[in-house]
Amino acid sequence: MNFLFFLRNKKFRLLYIFRLSSKLQRSEKKNIFFKTIRKILATYYNSLQHDFCCELPQATEIGKGLNLPHPYGIIINHNTVIGDNCTILHFVTFGNNVNKGNDNLPVIGNNVVFGAGAKIIGPCNIGNNVKIGANAVVVTDIKDNCIAAGVPAKILK
């Protein structure tokens, strides 16, 4: 990886620092060196989140290959589970229905694409190879290999 690419590409830095700080956060190492590195990374990561106006908590369980082409305004609840190779466009929100309790969050499969402005409100499961349209509001389960759009989201294909 080219160091200049790291310096120039803010989106890449956001994901890279997210992965690194999440890994260190879960680490069992308790010595002063790791505590200091964790604090430095957490501070830098928080400033990146502020720059992008996004919330991507370090406790979030996210699979490999996450793609954030435009990471502005993305809000992800810390208990949301996101599978591999997902693409999330700007202003997408993953949250819970407060009327159904705080633990009822979305579980996202692999290879899912979220259009700009989509809202995923748990409890719901989104299968593999799904596409969610722009500004869709998902409040129910979406099966594998589907396209969903609308308010509330309905399966189109």
Image (cartoon, rainbow, N blue to C red):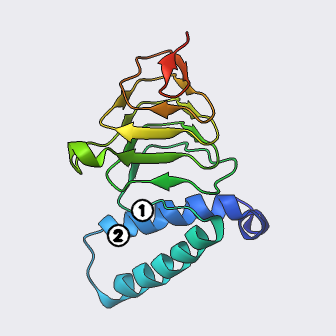
Q: Earlier in the sequence, mark 2 or mark 1?
A: 2
Which residue is rendered at x = 48% and y = 84% of the image? 40
Which quadrant does the C terminus fall into?
top right
- 14 or 70, nearer to the observer: 70
Quarter assignment of residue 13: bottom right
Q: Is residue 135 above or below residue 101?
A: above
> Residue at the spot x=63%, y=48% of the render?
68
Depth check: give the residue in front, 153 or 10.
153
Compared across the picture, whether 140 is left or right of 19 comes to left
In the rendered image, which quarter is residue 104 located in? Answer: top left
Residue 73 percent across, percent down from the top left: 60, 57
Which element carries disc 1, helix, strand or loop? loop
Which residue in the rendered view is the most extreme toward the top?
A: 157
Closer mark to the observer between disc 2 and disc 1: 1
Q: CA distance from mark 2 to mark 1?
A: 11 Å
How many numbered discs sit on the rendered protein?
Answer: 2
- In this image, 125 relative to 56: left or right? left
**At label 1, which amino acid type do we have?**
Pro
Read off the residue under disc 1: 57
Instruction: Using the image as rendered, state which of residue 83 and residue 141 is in the foreground.
Output: 141
Taking the spot 55% from the left edge, 32% from the top edge, the residue there is 136
Secondary element at tag 2: helix
Residue placed most toward the observer, 16 or 76: 76
Residue 28 picture location, percent across and down: 25, 70
In the rendered image, the vertical position of residue 149 relative to residue 117, given as above or below:
above
**Quarter of the image containing the N terminus?**
bottom right
> Which label was assigned to residue 25?
2
Callout 2, which amino acid?
Gln
Residue at point 49% right, 47% down? 93
Binning the other alpha carbons within 10 Å of mark 2 as few (below 14), some (14 to 19) or many (20 upward) gives some
Q: Residue 155: x, y in percent?
A: 49, 15
